[in-house]
Image (spheres, rainbow, N blue to C red):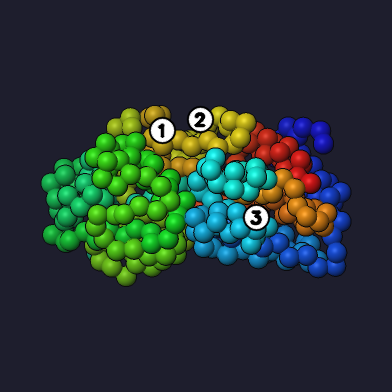
Amino acid sequence: MNAPTNLKQLCLAAVAFAAASIQMHASTTINGSGSSFAAPIIIRWGIDFQKAHPETRINYQSVGSGAGITQFIQNITDFGASDVAMSDEEIAKVGGNVLLLPATAGTIVFAYNIPGISTGLKLSRAAYIGILLGTVKSWNDPLIAKDNTDLKLPNLPITVVSRSDGSGTTGVFTAHLSAVSADFKAQVGSGKSVTWPVGVAGKGNEGVTALIKQTPGAIGYVEFGYAANNKLSMASPQNKAGNFITPTIESGAITLASVTLPENFRAFITDPEGANDYPIASFSWLLVKKSYPTADKAAAVKAFVAYGLTTGQSVAPELGYITLPDSVVKKVLAALETVK
């Protein structure tokens, strides 16, 4: 395939690539599981792809990145999805038979439920670390109030809402918090599953979103699209440069624009430095086998992933995701072509 130079050419190239690759039986089912962060866009891709390719069925289960990686390793699924790249140890468990392909990107937000305050909440780094460690217990705490003099903060207990399942969202979020605070790193650490010192937990971005909506005084971490689509209020966190950044698709795109993908695609920024960077943004990866047991399965997976990387990117903004830059799509499509 000739190297495309813009998104339109990428789309045309991917369609040609998919058409040349599809050598499937009358009905082929592709099973995937993992990230709840990326679930809305992957499910949308599946629906749209099936309309154009009725001979292929896409079955994706939003079980969390941790379970998605486990099921991929156990050969239960044809592809996985994770918001944290597989570790060297996890890759070794599949004998290296995996490509980690950035397929979408987004931001993680502090979503909250404070009666009477729907917008405008600012959270300094000291404030959000204090909230999550349980040392800041009420919404009118001086540490929060000093940056929100224009808001009438209530004397309302804070309820932290976290994830109960192994989660790439948690992995990205705690990696950032550990980069920001030595205390957080020592007391909680980072990873897909951690022990939170305070609060309640829900399963998936869906469960956290539901708990925030029904709990006055709650604050939790979810993917931007979940917060936006469920009309949750979102705080503006302070970035490394000291600025309070409103979570938007545009502010997340500014952060990811500074990322240079390494050869293995496992790029991650724990604490971006730009003056306008939103502080918690990441790629979300599809886990695809380098070699599939049958030609029709390989062709179907390649065609579906190529669709998501090209035509499927057009739905990213409406679902709250960041459209991948053309340069990233070009590199990932080249890697996808090697699947056999």
Among the two numbered marks 1 and 2 on one chain, the one whose residue lies closer to the N terminus = 2
Q: Residue 71, how many percent across, how many down?
A: 58, 59
- Height in image: 26 above or below 336? below
**Can residue 239 be seen by looking at this rendering?**
no
Residue 106, horizontal then vertical, whole percent: 50, 47
Occupied quadrant, residue 230? bottom left
Labels 3 and 1 touching (C-beta < 8 A): no
Which residue occupies the foreground of this view, 314 or 128? 128
Dots 2, 3 in contact, CB < 8 A: no
Residue displayed at 38% across by 68% down = 210
Residue closer to the observer: 309 or 172: 172
Tags 1 and 2 touching, CB below 8 Å: yes
Judge left or right: residue 312 versus residue 105.
right
On the image, the x and y values in percent for residue 63 come to 51, 63
Give the labeled residue for mark 2: 258
Mark closer to the observer (2, 3): 3
Task: Looking at the picture, tell me which residue is in the foreground, 161 or 297.
Answer: 297
> Which mark identifies residue 48?
none
Q: Name which of mark 3 and mark 1 comes first in the sequence.
A: 3
Residue ID for mark 3: 79
- In primary-sequence order, the first of circles 2 and 3 is 3
Label 1 sits on what residue type?
Pro
Q: Distance between the residues labelled 2 and 3?
A: 28 Å
The disc placed on residue 272 is 1
Q: Which of label 3 and label 1 is nearer to you?
A: 3
Q: Tell me the crowding category of disc 2: few under 14, some 14 to 19, or many 20 or more residues within 10 angstroms, Cα based.
A: few
**What amino acid does circle 3 point to?**
Phe
Name the spot of residue 87 as percent of width and height, x first: 52, 42
